[in-house]
Image (cartoon, coloured by chain):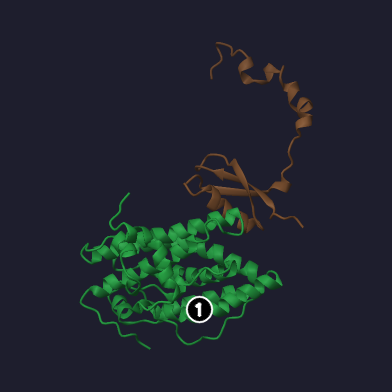
Amino acid sequence: MKNSVTCAPQSWHFEYVLRLGDNALILGQRISEWCGHSPFVEEDVAMANTALDHIGRARMLLTHAGNLQGNKQTEDDLAYSRNEREFKNFLLCELPIGDFAYTIVRQVLLDTYHFHLYAALQKSSDDTLAAIAAKVVKESTYHLRHSSEWLIRLGDGTEESQRRAQLALDNQWRFTSEFFLADEVDDVAHQAGVGVDVSLLEKLWRDNVNDILSAACLLRPEDAPLRASGRMGLHTEHMGFLLAEMQSVQRAYPGLDW
Amino acid sequence: MNKHLPLWEVFLRSRRGLEHKHVGSLHAADPEQAMQYARDVYTRRMEGCSIWVVLANDIHASQEAEGEAFFDPAEDKVYRHASFYDVPDDLKL
């Protein structure tokens, strides 16, 4: 299935990098909600570190996107002044944090995706993107280690932790098909050597996730109908609330700097 | 059941060639988790390039009450320091 996204010349490049930046920004914003609320203090620091890693990569990617667009918009313009329909992140990134098992499941699904994505992007013909990927892949290696060990601990833990982890997985699985739905932007970016081969990425992701799920004694859910409208700017009901909080200061005091 | 996860002591080596130094402690379920939390809690500002974690229960410590017997006898043995001895002038070092 192909989405119909029509691209003006070169706008695919901006769009490709913007999507990466939006995934990082929205996921980072979500993870940061654990700050002060994690199960214990060591995990609180670990979660906050992970959130900051994502915000950090969002800054690099959105700055790069702005440059590709001829410096029309800064990283702050892109993060704080766009409306909901203009954000192109995966729906999975914007879903509420849920309980700890829910967050860990999401992290495993996305950390695995990011690990293989950025490993491949290190060879991008876009030098800036390749340099960002070389930095990001190290972070994602660590994130995946943290989240996958937690998922194994939960899935292979108590009856209650197993139940919650499986429930979270069953709820989130249908959102993962969006990762591998290549549209015109992906195709053009891949042909230009800027982007990755989505079908290869999907194979690497599935193999890796299958291994983690079997180590965690969790059942891989059946593939379900697509929930894949994030890149078209069509979001879940949760996105508006997330943006309202994230953008509140810039909305109240436009252009504020400190 | 203990309310907390086991306690671990964390040692960091700040640079290659230097020794590991005790920097603090944390709670974690197992060695892998202790290692990750040590990384997250103690090396966020580039404090180290190598981490050791040790179960606090596995460390045997000298006791305060034994201090006199353990350490006081060394007080009057200045000849145990190399600097106590005069080096002969004609000794080629």
Q: What shade has chain B been given? A: brown
Q: Amino acid at mark 1?
A: Arg
Q: Along the horizontal axis of the image, is A71 left or right of A45?
A: left
Local SS, label 1 = helix
In this figure, which residue is indicated by the disc labeled 1? A206
Q: Along the horizontal axis of the image, is A120 left or right of B4?
A: left
Judge by depth and name the residue closer to the eye, A97 or A243.
Answer: A243
Chain ID of residue with mark 1? A
Q: Position of residue A147 (x, y in %)?
A: 55, 65
Point out the image quarter for the N terminus of chain B. Answer: bottom right
Figure quadrant of residue B28: bottom right
Q: Position of residue A184 (x, y in %)?
A: 30, 82
Judge by depth and name the residue closer to the eye, B25 or A92.
Answer: A92
Figure quadrant of residue A197: bottom left
Tell me which chain appears green: A
Q: Position of residue A95 (x, y in %)?
A: 48, 72
Mark 1 packing: few (<14 Cα in 10 Å), some, or many (20+)? some
Point out the image quarter for the C terminus of chain B. Answer: top right
Which residue occupies 45% across, 71% down? A94
Above or below, comparing residue A131 to residue A110 in the picture: above
Judge by depth and name the residue closer to the eye, B65 or A243.
Answer: A243
Above or below, comparing residue A15 to residue A142 in the picture: below
Which residue occupies 37% across, 68% down? A22
Visible in this render: residue A119?
no
Judge by depth and name the residue closer to the eye, B93 or B80.
Answer: B80
Visible in this render: residue A35?
yes
